Image: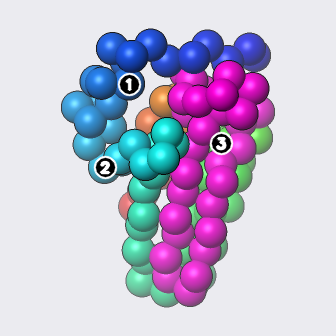
Amino acid sequence: MAAKPLTPAQIAALPTELPQWTVREGKLHRELRFADFSAAFGFMTRVALAAEALEHHPEWCNVWNRVTINLTTHDTGGLSDLDLALAQQIDGLVS
């Protein structure tokens, strides 16, 4: 699926559409905390399956109970509809 860049209006609407996310350095950014490493890793596994289905993969980091996620689309040089779709799926996976 070819990514479609988000328009300036769509980017301006992101705080309303994705209130748990911020735009940081041109990327969608979210930090999450879990009870422990197993819960964080389980969440990452669920995100990995969603990302693979979209063929769109996050930039992320895990340190013990914390997961930091950045979404961007390198092919478009910024945010795209794939970032929005993955962020929405991630929000649905947060327990």
Marking on residue 20: 2
Residue 53 visible in the current orientation: no
Q: What residue type is labelled 3?
A: Ala
User: Which quadrant would the C terminus be assigned to in this image?
Assistant: bottom left
Label 1, secondary structure: give it. helix
Q: What stretch is highlighted in magenta?
A: 54-83
Q: Does the magenta stretch include residue 50?
A: no
Q: Earlier in the sequence, mark 1 or mark 3?
A: 1
The percent coordinates of residue 83 (x first, y second) are 56, 33
Dot 3 surroundings within 10 Å: few (below 14), some, or many (20 or more)? some
The percent coordinates of residue 88 (x first, y second) are 45, 36
Name the residue rendered at 66%, 54% in the picture. Answer: 59
Q: In this view, does 65 lie above or below 1?
A: below
Q: What residue type is labelled 1?
A: Ile
Tag 3 residue: 50
Q: Which of marks 1 and 2 is nearer the N terminus?
A: 1
Q: In this view, does 11 lie above or below 92?
A: above
Q: Which of marks 1 and 2 is in front?
A: 1
Label 2, secondary structure: give it. loop
Q: Distance between the residues labelled 1 and 2?
A: 14 Å
Identity of the residue furthest to the left in this view: 16
Q: Which amino acid does label 2 sit on?
A: Gln
